Amino acid sequence: MKIVSTEFVIGVARLDQLPGDGLPEVALAGRSNVGKSSLINRMLNRKNLARTSAQPGKTQQLNFYRVNGEMYFVDFPGYGYAKVSQKQREKWGRLIESYIRGRKQLKLQLLIVDLRHPPTGDDKLMYDWLRYYGIPTCVVATKADKVPRTRRERHLRAVRETLGLDDGVPLVLFSAETGEGRDELWNIVRQAIAG
């Protein structure tokens, strides 16, 4: 995909703040520090559009990034981060659930996991929840450059088995460092927003 323009549009803390232009949306969910911001930056060929941080829990709202004036990436707050209060986690959970269940513009949910480790209980809950509500989903295993090629298939199998991935749910190896998986992921995104 040729990237002509990208911009951060809005950070949404309430549903009444959602963009009203009707463009298709691709959302990203995953635990804190799994590499969602780095993935967005690599997909959009930008260094710091989505802010990365060594401090987990930096994203605290639904962040909307407009791409080529024709779609959005929507970055969710990371889950599973202990230093965020229970009350704040519940608030994020309600916002994310309401968005996913009610947003007609949502064409694809990217569930981001770290290839180096089996998915967490929170990852499994998120996948089961997306499956229950029939949300089109693609699982993206980040940090692929950190796993030797000879061990990748074993790690991918752990992702598939831990999540209980259905046949037909794409699983993409991705590295924000090298760009591996970028073209494959763009193909999946393009098909989703065209459908």
Image (tube, helix red, strand yellow):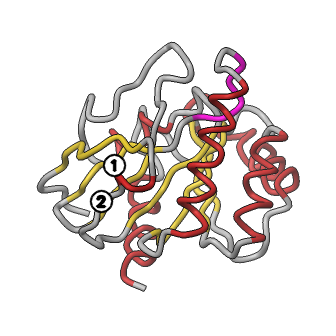
Residue at 46% over, 38% down: 61
Circle 2: residue type:
Pro
Circle 1: residue type:
Phe
Check the picture and name the quadrant holding the N terminus: bottom left
Residue 161 numbered mark, or none: none
- 145 is within the stretch colored magenta: no
What residue sits right under mark 2 in the picture? 19
Residue at 19% over, 49% down: 6
Check the picture and name the quadrant holding the C terminus: bottom left
Q: In the figure, is residue 74 to the left or right of 70? A: right
Is 90 situated above or below 21? above
Residue at 39% over, 59% down: 183
Mark 2 vs mark 1: give the one in front.
2
Give the number of marks.
2
x and y, in percent, of residue 43 in the image: 34, 48
Residue 64 numbered mark, or none: 1
Give the main secondary structure of the magenta stretch. Answer: loop
- SS of the residue under disc 2: loop
Q: Give the residues drawn in magenta, as a range.
A: 78-82
Quadrant for residue 39, please give it: top left
| Number of residues whose C-alpha sits closer than 10 Å to that of mark 1, classed few (under 14), some (14–19) or many (20 or more) | many
Is 120 situated above or below 181? above
